[in-house]
Amino acid sequence: MTVSDAELTRAIASPATAPPPATAFADWPMGWCTLGTSSELSRGPVSRERFGRRVVGYRTSGGQAVAMDARCWHMGADLGSGDVVGDCVRCPFHGWQFDATGRCARVRSGDTPPPGARQRTFATAERGGRVFVFPGDAPNHPLPFFDGVAPHELFAAPPFEFRLRCPWWLVGTNGFDVQHFLGAHDRRLVAPPAVSSPHPAARRVVATFEVVGRAWRDRLTRRVSGPFVAMDVTVWAGSLVFVQARFTRAPGGPHRTTSYGLVEIVPGTSSDDGEPTSVVRITIFVRKRPGVRGLIDPLDVRVRRQFIRAFLEPDARLLDGARYRPERLIAADRLMTDYLAWLAPVSHGNLASEEPT
């Protein structure tokens, strides 16, 4: 049995939540983001634009991943163009060395470093071959991962990206916009979605859909994986989205196959016409098969990567140029409205004080 539009509206429309204004969101979410791969930092300093500033990452002699402001306190040179000396990153301009705490430990000229010579540092964490950085020295939530799965259990495909002309905070609404799945993806909702908050910095929605499309990918999906899919989407602080798609022969039945997707949402610079932009980077994973070696896992994950990229391309086209006008949201937009009302304070690092559900 499927859910009609009227039944869906009744299920999610009450009580009403006031949608926040566009000005309520931070320029950059207070959440984890990728700084670089683990191997990149092992080869030397890496600097990238993060949090509206240049951030450099490097490894100490003991292997610790360190992140700090990349613009040297002295004259603003990019420390990412320097090198690593022991536990310090050395500026390429005048050779000033900054340790893992951000303190200037040495000046090439031999002068005593000024007392205020210090770089701002940021919290880091490593997982799955990547170094993540948080826009503060103490994170307000741990680095998340897929629920019930350890990183070593998954095999990853190369990531792919979409560049969109829309604000970063609008991208995550896609997972809570259950109405669009039928029109954009030929997925018909079969039961009201369940929304929860596993952590004050996280918002989760689980919804089951029937695969009703007639395209060859949909026919193959029904035959190989099953005609029903439970979409499990968890957004952490607006910057990381963990998606698990579990395919079954019947709603609530045993899972035949599961695909895992990590979505990174990165605020971009303004476009030529002054509109905000976003970079959406997606990595697809599959569970490793115990005792199986060779090309099976790499082939499996690359096939799924192609399917999922094709599945997401309509979303990228529809979100490109999307505009947010709170006064135009209706009762059927309730899940999106609630999501945005939750995200607005969380994007600034203001987490709810109550215990997560």
Image: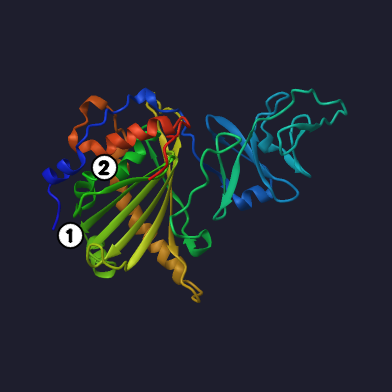
Question: CA separation, marks 1 and 2?
Answer: 22 Å
Q: Image point 71% across, 36% down: which residue?
A: 101
Rendering quarter of residue 220: bottom left
Horizontal side of residue 87 vs 54, given as left or right: right
Q: Which residue is mark 1?
A: 214
Amino acid beneath label 2? Asp
Q: Image point 74% across, 25% down: which residue?
A: 117
Q: Image point 31% across, 33% down: which residue?
A: 321
Question: Where residue 226 sits in the image (x, y, percent)?
Answer: 25, 66
Visible in this render: residue 171? Answer: yes
Q: Image point 85% across, 25% down: which residue?
A: 112
Specify the farthest residue to the bottom.
291
Look at the numbered disc 2 and give the secondary structure of its residue: loop
Look at the numbered disc 1 and give the secondary structure of its residue: loop
Q: Are marks 1 and 2 in contact (CB under 8 Å)?
A: no
Q: Which residue is mark 2?
A: 177
Question: Where residue 177 sits in the image (x, y, percent)?
Answer: 26, 42
Specify the farthest residue to the right.
110
Question: Where residue 238 sits in the image (x, y, percent)?
Answer: 42, 38
Question: Where residue 243 sits in the image (x, y, percent)?
Answer: 38, 52
Q: Nearer the viewer, residue 354 or 184?
A: 354
